[in-house]
Image (tube, rainbow, N blue to C red):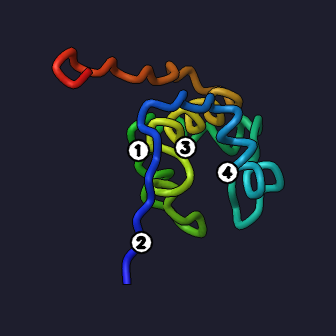
């Protein structure tokens, strides 16, 4: 049995704080299952040292008690924005990702 889901690929991408509030808040606000709390610089510091790509990979694929967030209600790009939002609130200095423009041939 399979399912088909139709999504508007041209929809406006959600901001990091919006995705955090909808997807990440439940664990990252309370520290459930060891999740680093938003704004907790001591908890985020060792994670930030691993770099943006490692953090994004963990968010998309899952790590420890956190299930993978990729392929869910939000686009991977939106999850990336949430990663930057959370890490920067914890002392990181990552630049928010910018969605690449569609090639002219695809328009």
Q: Quadrant of the C terminus?
A: top left
Return the residue nearer the eye: 57 or 7: 7
User: Helix, strand or loop at disc 2?
Assistant: loop
Is label 4 or label 2 in front?
Answer: 2
Which residue in the structure is indicated by mark 4?
23
User: Up-down: is 32 above or below 13?
Assistant: below
Instruction: Tell me if 88 is positioned left or right of 9 in this view.
Output: right
Considering only order in the chain, which callout, 1 or 4, is on the residue closer to the N terminus? 4
Which residue in the structure is indicated by mark 3?
47
Q: Quadrant of residue 34?
A: bottom right
Is label 4 or label 1 in front?
Answer: 4
Which residue in the structure is indicated by mark 1?
54
Q: CA distance from mark 3 to mark 2?
A: 36 Å
Q: CA distance from mark 1 to mark 3?
A: 9 Å
> Residue 45: x, y in percent?
61, 37
Q: Residue furthest bottom?
A: 1
Instruction: Tell me if 12 is positioned left or right of 37 in this view.
Output: left
User: Helix, strand or loop at disc 1?
Assistant: helix
Which residue in the structure is indicated by mark 2?
3
Considering only order in the chain, which callout, 2 or 3, is on the residue closer to the N terminus? 2
- Tell me if label 3 and label 2 are in contact, CB under 8 Å: no
Q: Residue at x 67, y 51 (%)?
A: 23
- Tell me if label 1 and label 3 are in contact, CB under 8 Å: no
Q: CA distance from mark 4 to mark 3?
A: 19 Å
Q: CA distance from mark 4 to mark 1?
A: 19 Å
Is label 4 or label 3 in front?
Answer: 4
Q: Residue at x 56, y 42 (%)?
A: 46
> Residue 29: x, y in percent?
80, 49
């Amino acid at each position: 049995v399979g399912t088909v889901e139709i999504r508007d690929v041209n929809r406006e991408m959600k901001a990091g704080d919006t995705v955090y509030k909808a997807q990440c808040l439940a664990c990252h606000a309370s520290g459930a299952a060891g999740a680093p709390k938003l704004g907790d610089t001591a908890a985020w510091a060792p994670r930030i040292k691993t770099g943006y790509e490692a953090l994004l990979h963990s968010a998309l694929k899952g790590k420890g008690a956190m299930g993978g967030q990729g392929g869910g209600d939000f686009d991977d790009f939106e999850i990336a924005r949430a990663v930057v939002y959370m890490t920067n609130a914890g002392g990181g200095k990552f630049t928010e990702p910018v969605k690449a423009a569609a090639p002219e041939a695809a328009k």
